[in-house]
Amino acid sequence: MSGHTSARKQEIISVTEQLIEAVNSGDFESYVRICDPGLTSFEPEGQGNLVEGTDFHRFYFDHPGSRSSPPVHTTILNPHVHMLGEDAACIAYVRLTQFVDAHGRPRSSQSEETRVWHRRDARWQNVHFHCSGVTAAPLRGPTHPSRDPVAGLARTRSHVGDGGHVTSSHLACGWRSHC
């Protein structure tokens, strides 16, 4: 792999982390700057429907839920970046999420994610993502978990570690960290 390609792949991992950090900090303004206005997604929260635009995700930013729940920690395992030319890329990874359940027991869940990025005007924008499996973060909070999909938020920072092969962040969003 050339140095140029390696640097581009690291850019994709970095912009993915920026997107996660925007979600973690509840920063909808940064989130929409990173996402294409026509963003599409398939995700568990969409109940099998193709979600278009960022309005669906705004709901989770506007209704942050309880901030008193324990934090959730997520690790992105083995991100694999495909460069699809100078201005397009795809990243695929497994997201492992650790959390404390309502009974105080540590638990883990896993989801598989793919993101498609397009560079316009020298900025990478997320144009599509797909999340398979369970939601990346557990649904928990002051009401029955199935009735409160946004409870349990905590704010922390995210970072890339181990040379870009494992990425960790504490989730701010009880719904997931990658929208």
Image (spheres, helix red, strand yellow):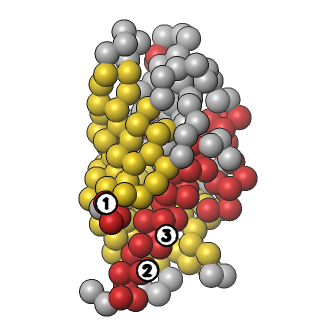
* CB contact under 8 Å: marks 2 and 1: no
* Residue wearing tag 3: 117
- SS for callout 1: helix
Q: Nearer the viewer, mark 3 or mark 1?
A: 1
Q: Amino acid at mark 3?
A: Trp
Which numbered disc covers residue 162? Answer: 1
179 and 97: which is toward the camera: 97
Tell me which corner region of the image, top left, top right, bottom left or bottom right, holds residue 82: bottom left
Query: Dot 3: few (<14), some (14–19), or many (≥20) neighbours within 10 Å?
Result: many
Whichever of callouts 3 and 2 sits on the residue coming sooner in the sequence is 2
Q: Is residue 147 left or right of residue 165?
A: right
- SS for callout 2: helix
Q: Is residue 5 above or below residue 41?
A: below
- SS for callout 3: strand
Which numbered disc covers residue 22? Answer: none
Rendered location of residue 155, percent (x, y) = 58, 36
* Residue wearing tag 2: 8
Query: Does residue 172 show up?
Result: yes
Q: Nearer the viewer, mark 2 or mark 1?
A: 1
